[in-house]
Amino acid sequence: MSVIHAAAIDAPRLQVVADEILVERAIDDDTAAFAALVHRHAPLMRAHARRMLGDSSDADDVVQDAFVIAWQQLPNLRDRAMVKSWLMKITSRCALSHLKRRPPTLPLPVVEPALPDTMQPENLAVRTAHLSALSVALDKLPEDQRNCWLLREVAELSYAEVAKEMNLTPASVRGKLARARVSLTIQLEGWR
C-alpha cells in the first residue's frame, strides 16, 4: 500500500483526533496528521490573514508561508494543545511582515464573509450588512489600532502577545485597543 493511499484512508479518522495527538504524529513525519491540522485550522487562518491584508490571494500566500514555518518549527512547540493559537501567531507574523513589504497607501477593501448556505436570506443580509459596517469601521481606524484589534479580537492573542507581535508595550496595546473599541462602538452605534 502506498504512503499516499494510506494517508487517504487515515484522513477521515484524523478529523476527530485531538490537536495535540495530530501534532505528535506530525512531528514523527506523519504527513496525513499535518494535513488534518491544515484542513482544521486553515479557514480561520485564511480569514484572519484576509482581514489583515484585505486581499484573498495575499492571504492565501500568507497562510501557505505560515504552514511552511509551522511544519519546520513544529518540534519546537511546547504546549501541543495550543497549536491553534500558535498557528494564528505565525499567521499574524507573516501577515504583518507582508504588510511591511507592501506600499502603505493601499486601502483595505470591504471583504465579503463566507457564510454557510443554510442561513435564512434575511439573516444572511443582516449579517452581511453588519460585517460590511464593521469592515468600513475598521478601515477608518489608524493601522496600529486596527492591527491591535485584529490580533486581540480575531487571532485571540493575549495583550502580552499582541505587544510582542507589534513591538509595543502592553500598556500601549491596552491604550490602542481602548481607542479602537471606543471608535468602533461609536461607528457601529446603529447595530446595537
Image (cartoon, rainbow, N blue to C red):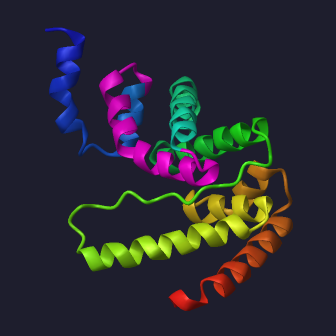
Residue at image position (45%, 47%) is: 81
Residue 78, image quadrant? top right
Residues 10 and 184: in front is 184
- Tally of numbered discs: 0
Residue 104 is left or right of residue 7, and the answer is: right
Point out the stretch of residues depicted in magenta.
27-55
Residue 101, image quadrant? top right
Up the image or down, 1 lies above or below 173; here it is above
Please state, as top left, top right, bottom left or bottom right, where the N terminus lies in the image. Answer: top left
Is 154 one of the magenta-colored residues?
no
Residue at image position (78%, 57%) is: 163
Q: Position of residue 74 (x, y in %)?
A: 52, 30
Q: Position of residue 175 (x, y in %)?
A: 82, 73
Residues 11 and 136: in front is 136
Q: Position of residue 58 (x, y in %)?
A: 58, 38
Residues 74 and 48: in front is 48
Up the image or down, 104 lies above or below 98; here it is below
Residue 100 is left or right of residue 82, and the answer is: right
Residue at image position (30%, 26%) is: 32
Residue that sits furthest to the top in the current view = 2
Residue at image position (31%, 78%) is: 123
Q: Position of residue 115 (x, y in %)?
A: 34, 61
Is 44 one of the magenta-colored residues?
yes
Q: Main secondary structure of the magenta part?
A: helix
Up the image or down, 184 lies above or below 128; here it is below
